[in-house]
Image: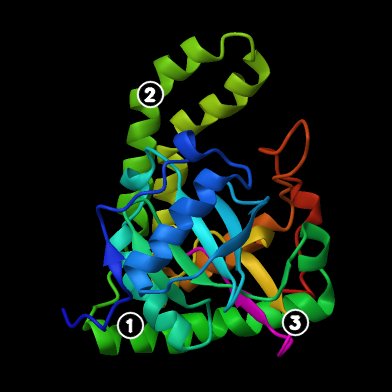
């Protein structure tokens, strides 16, 4: 494998949110100031740190310095590394940023990273379904599937081997392992437990999907998590970019597109049912 040059990385540096807290306190500012000094050699004063809502597996902040650019600070969630490959995420993100598909990583530390700050907005679920917006999303997905795949195959000498099925099998097996513990912790939430238990009976559905996608499918670089929170509209120049490639893998293009269409009906900020999907909000045949 040919690895492209990576951003500065210090595995022994960590941001301990349990110690510094999630608010704009001195502890968190000092921790980020230390990151900027040790990783980038920047002696800057961190003026303000603001937590950003919307992330589900990570905790993210905007970091504003007295002088110089702003950054996005992403602190990884605990106990999730078994679900995906951090090495793949950083290698692929480096290349995809060069293709203009995602933001540029600035530095990495033991439990997170610093990214360039993107002036713009994260899409809402209704925005994602607007005609002009979903046309932009379709274009950048095609760039990722075509240009991104070519760049990663070329620079990393990777063969496009479908990783989707092994991942789904691994997740389903883990769900079976932890199910009894989940029931024990959430005994008072029977309705949610009944809904979640359906995941345990998914192997036949996975096998059916595997069979349907086995023939004549392009295996491409796929995001696999294109919900509205992972799609941004930049202010200048005005165009869509994609963020958070932790679930990305080689997969059938049809799966990545279909998974995105499922996200049209999701609302992860719903106060009572963030786990439910309204498939009636999916695209029409004309939109597809």
Instruction: Classify the position of the C terminus by image quarter.
Output: bottom right
Residue under label 3? 235
Element carrying mark 2 = helix
**Which of the 4 image quarters holds residue 175?**
top left
- The answer to whether any part of residue 5 appears in the image is yes
Q: Residues within 10 Å of mark 2 (few under 14, many from 20)?
A: few
Residue at mark 1 to residue at mark 3: CA–CA distance: 28 Å
Which portion, as a residue range, is magenta? 235-248
| Sooner in the amino-acid sequence: mark 1 or mark 3 | 1
Taking the magenta stretch, the answer to whether it contains residue 240 is yes
Query: Which numbered dot is residue 127?
Result: none
Residue under label 1? 152
Residue under label 2? 178
Image coordinates for residue 50, horizontal then vertical, percent: 66, 54
Element carrying mark 1 = helix
* Residue 127 appears left or right of 225: right
Dot 2 and dot 3 residues touching (CB under 8 Å): no
Q: Is residue 164 above or below residue 22?
A: below
Image coordinates for residue 245, horizontal then vertical, percent: 46, 65
| Residue at 42% from the left image edge and 21% from the top image edge | 179
Pick the front one: 250 or 209: 250
């Amino acid at each position: 494998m040919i690895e492209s040059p990576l951003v500065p990385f210090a595995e022994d540096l960590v941001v301990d949110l349990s110690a510094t807290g999630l608010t704009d306190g001195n502890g968190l500012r000092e921790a980020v100031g230390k990151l900027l000094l040790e990783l980038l050699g920047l002696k800057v004063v961190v003026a303000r740190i603001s937590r950003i809502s919307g992330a589900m597996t990570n905790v993210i902040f905007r970091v504003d310095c007295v002088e110089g650019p702003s950054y996005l600070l992403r602190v990884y969630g605990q106990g999730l590394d078994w679900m995906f490959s951090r090495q793949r995420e950083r290698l692929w993100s480096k290349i995809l940023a060069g293709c203009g598909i995602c933001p540029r990583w600035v530095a990495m530390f033991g439990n997170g990273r610093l990214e360039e700050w993107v002036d713009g907005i994260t899409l809402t679920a209704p925005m994602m379904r607007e005609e002009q917006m979903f046309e932009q999303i379709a274009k950048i997905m095609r760039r990722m599937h075509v240009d991104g795949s070519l760049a990663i195959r070329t620079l990393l000498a990777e063969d496009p081997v479908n990783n989707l099925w092994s991942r789904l099998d691994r997740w389903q097996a883990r769900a079976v392992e932890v199910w009894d513990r989940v029931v024990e912790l959430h005994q008072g939430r029977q309705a949610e437990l009944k809904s979640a238990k359906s995941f345990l009976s998914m192997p036949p559905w996975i096998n059916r999907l595997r069979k349907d996608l086995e023939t004549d499918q392009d295996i491409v670089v796929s995001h696999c998590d294109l919900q509205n929170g992972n799609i941004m509209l930049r202010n200048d120049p005005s165009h869509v970019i994609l963020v958070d490639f932790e679930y990305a893998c080689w997969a059938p293009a049809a799966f990545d597109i279909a998974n995105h269409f499922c996200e049209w009906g999701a609302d992860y900020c719903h106060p009572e049912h963030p786990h439910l999907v309204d498939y009636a909000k999916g695209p029409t045949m004309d939109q597809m």
